[in-house]
Amino acid sequence: MPNLALLIFLVVLLTQIVSWVGQIVLQELAFTIYSKIFLTRSANEQSKLRKQVLKDKAELGATSSQDEFAKWAKIRRRLDKGLADLEKLNTQMTSSKGSFTTKFKTFLWVITSGSKLVLVWWFRKKPVFWLPEGWVPYPIAWLISFPSAPIGSVSSGAWSTICTRVLVSLEEIVKALLAPSIPAEPIPTAPFPTANEKQGAKIEPITLEHEKLD
C-alpha cells in the first residue's frame, strides 16, 4: 500500500489545483475535448444548417413575394424546415452539454472532496506518522490525533487539514509576490519664498469702512 501521508497529500493537492484553476474552466475544457471526440458529427451538421439558414434568409430577402410568389414560397418552406431542424439540433446539443456538466461535476467531487473524506474516515484509527515522545504537550497531542488515532500520532484528519492550510498559505504568498506593487505618491511640498520675493512682497493696508451716522 502506498504511503498514507503521501496519498492524502496528493488528494489534497489535486483538490487545491482544481480550486486554483477553477471548476468552470476545467469543465469547458473537458467538454471541448469531449465534443471533438463524440459530438463531431452533430457539430458539423449544426454548422451546415446555420450556413444554409443564413443563405436561405438572404435569398428570401432578395425575392419578391408578389412578382415571384412560387419561388418565394419554396424558399420560405425550406427556410422554415431549416430553422426547425436547427432548433432541434441546438436542443440536443444543449441537453448533451447539461448531461456532461452534471457527470463532470460528480467526477471532480469524487476524485477530490469525496476521496479525501473516504481516506480520512477509512484511516481514522491509523496513525499517519508518529511524533517524538514529549515533543508536544498533551492537549495538542490529543488534538492532532483526533478523532480516533493513538495519542502521540498524527491522524488522517489532522494531516489533511495541515496539508490544506500549507497549500492555501503558499497560494497567498505567491499571489502577494506576483501582485503589482503600487508606487507611493510623493507628498506635495510648498516652495519656500526667496529673499527677493520677500522684499518684493507688499503689505496692503486694510481699510475699514465705517457706517456714516446721520
Image (cartoon, grey):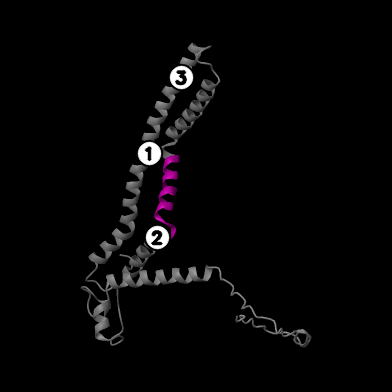
Report the mark closest to the observer, 1 or 2.
1
Crowdedness near tag 1: few (<14), some (14–19) or many (≥20) residues, C-alpha within 10 Å: few
Residue segment shown in magenta = 17-36
Give the residue pinned by disc 3: 76
Disc assigned to residue 193: none
Q: Secondary structure at mark 2?
A: helix
By secondary structure, the bulk of the magenta-drawn segment is best described as: helix
Q: Residue flagged by tag 1: what amino acid is it? A: Thr
Report the mark closest to the observer, 3 or 2.
3
Please report whichever mark, 1 or 2, sits nearer to the chain's N-terminal start.
2
Residue at x 67%, y 83% (from the top left corner): 207
Disc assigned to residue 94: 1
Foreground pick, 196 / 155 = 196
Residue at x 49%, y 12% (from the top left corner): 69
Relative to 41, 111 lies left or right? left
Disc assigned to residue 19: 2
Q: Secondary structure at mark 1?
A: helix
Q: Residue flagged by tag 3: what amino acid is it? A: Arg
Q: Secondary structure at mark 3?
A: helix
